[in-house]
């Protein structure tokens, strides 16, 4: 009748090699199908009997093991919810007593051979997790840093080839299948297994090489010199071939080679200059730094003398030097911007543009902007805020509320 089997049900003892199962309704009607006859010997299949202790049937034991496998060890609230027939305390005590601390499993069922100098206790050691893995919430900063990895489940939020299981959801092996159809279904299952192996291979590479915490990996990469960082970036694609230890040794060896080459070049420079002791080398380095500083000052003085006759060119040069000192790059051809930043509010161009954009966005959102709102929006000196506000009003960038 193709209905879902519920215990008790009937199993034919003569039909084989595949099992033939009947529900009680079909059995009482004498249902016959293919090789099965109503006069065959049969077995009554039921799990409504205790196995390990009274009050727990075999069916409940199997349901408990499946619930622990689905929900995880220690998650007794969800285990009890899936069990439906037992409380959280009953599930925990029964599992710990019969499956964790039961010496029967360490002697008879598992057939463990103890060595002569065994240092293990007679019973199984209760599981006590030493560290609770992080459980970042979905789309949080930590979750994005960990690429959606869930340490408690050792899975990613979105796996590689995430929809591989869709090809199997409608496959069902039945006795009526032809040989070609049966072989085709087996081929689909083999393809699915190969896709699972590729998923596990990629996941293992990510875990072994520590790529889950990308920020920590990038900080480690920045510790190397620029030349070694470029090599690190090129050789990253070969990390899947070598193990994590071999890959790190390869990078470290090249970093050491770079340091040795740089030290050799420094010693060659000392020898070329006629230096024969490290004390003389220290004096040489100090004099070399002073010489480079003097050369830089002479270059700056030449630039000043070049623009000293042209007031506007001199002002451009001063604004350029101010931007360089603040770590900002000047925009070419932005003369008005330089005048405003240097002479009016005394801000670097990058900071001025950031404050200007913030005020424009707020004015566009509210349809106008007051001075008090501008001061609350950008936290700088109130006089500078007033100058920026008045200039933007004057030029028509914003309007008063």
Image: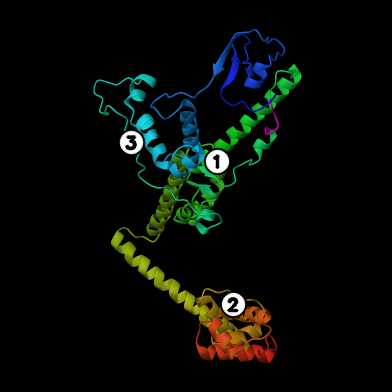
Which residue does the numbered mark 1 point to in the structure image? 238
Q: Secondary structure at mark 3?
A: loop
Q: Secondary structure at mark 1?
A: helix
Q: Secondary structure at mark 2?
A: helix
- State the residue at coordinates (47%, 30%): 60
Is residue 196 inside the magenta stretch? no
Which residue does the numbered mark 2 point to in the structure image? 354
Q: Look at the image and tell me in which quarter the N terminus lies.
A: top right
Above or below residue 329? Residue 78 is above
Above or below residue 194? Residue 132 is below
Where residue 73 appears, as percent x and y from the top left, is 43, 39
Q: In this rendering, would 43 be left or right of 127?
A: right
Precedes in sequence: disc 2 or disc 1: 1
Which residue does the numbered mark 3 point to in the structure image? 126
Q: CA distance from mark 2 to mark 3?
A: 59 Å
- State the residue at coordinates (63%, 34%): 195
Precedes in sequence: disc 1 or disc 3: 3
Q: Marks 2 and 3: which is nearer the front? A: 3
Q: Marks 2 and 1: which is nearer the front? A: 2
Q: CA distance from mark 2 to mark 1?
A: 42 Å
Is there any visible trace of residue 146 in the rendered image? Answer: yes
Which of these two is toward me, 137 or 322?
137
Is there any visible trace of residue 347 in the rendered image? Answer: no
Where residue 12 appears, as percent x and y from the top left, is 61, 13
Q: What segment carries the magenta color?
A: 168-172
Where residue 190 appears, as percent x and y from the top left, is 65, 26
Precedes in sequence: disc 2 or disc 3: 3
């Amino acid at each position: 009748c193709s209905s879902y089997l519920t215990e008790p049900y009937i199993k034919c003892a003569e039909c084989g090699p595949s099992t033939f199962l009947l529900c009680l309704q079909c059995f009482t009607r004498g249902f016959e199908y293919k090789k099965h006859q109503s006069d065959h010997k049969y077995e009554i299949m039921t799990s409504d009997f205790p196995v390990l202790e009274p009050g727990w049937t075999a069916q409940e034991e199997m349901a408990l093991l499946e619930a622990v496998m689905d929900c995880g060890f220690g998650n007794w609230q969800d285990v009890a919810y899936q069990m439906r027939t037992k409380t959280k305390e009953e599930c925990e005590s029964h599992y710990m007593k019969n499956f964790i601390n039961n010496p029967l499993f360490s002697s008879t069922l598992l057939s463990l051979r103890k060595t002569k100098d065994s240092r293990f206790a007679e019973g199984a050691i209760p599981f006590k997790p030493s560290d609770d893995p992080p459980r970042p919430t979905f789309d949080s900063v930590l979750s994005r840093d960990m690429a959606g990895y869930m340490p408690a489940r050792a899975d990613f939020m979105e796996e590689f080839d995430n929809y591989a299981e869709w090809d199997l959801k409608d496959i069902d092996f039945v006795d009526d299948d032809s040989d070609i159809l049966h072989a085709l279904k087996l081929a689909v299952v083999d393809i699915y297994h190969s896709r699972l192996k590729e998923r596990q291979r990629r996941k293992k590479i990510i875990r072994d090489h520590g790529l889950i915490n990308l920020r920590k990996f990038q900080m480690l990469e920045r510790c190397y010199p620029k030349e070694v960082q470029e090599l690190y970036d090129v050789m990253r694609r070969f990390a899947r071939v070598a193990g994590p230890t071999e890959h790190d040794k390869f990078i470290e060896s090249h970093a050491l080679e770079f340091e040795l080459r740089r030290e050799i070049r420094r010693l060659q420079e000392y020898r070329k200059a006629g230096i024969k002791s490290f004390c003389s080398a220290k004096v040489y380095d100090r004099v070399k730094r002073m010489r480079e500083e003097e050369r830089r000052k002479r270059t700056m003085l030449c630039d000043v003398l070049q623009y000293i006759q042209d007031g506007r060119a001199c002002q451009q040069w001063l604004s350029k030097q101010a931007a360089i000192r603040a770590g900002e790059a000047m925009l070419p051809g932005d003369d008005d911007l330089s005048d405003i930043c240097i002479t009016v509010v005394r801000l670097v161009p990058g900071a001025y543009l950031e404050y200007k954009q913030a005020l424009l966005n707020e004015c566009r959102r509210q349809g106008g902007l007051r001075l008090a709102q501008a001061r609350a929006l950008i936290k700088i000196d109130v006089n500078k805020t007033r100058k920026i506000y008045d200039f933007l009003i004057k030029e028509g960038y914003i309007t008063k509320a």
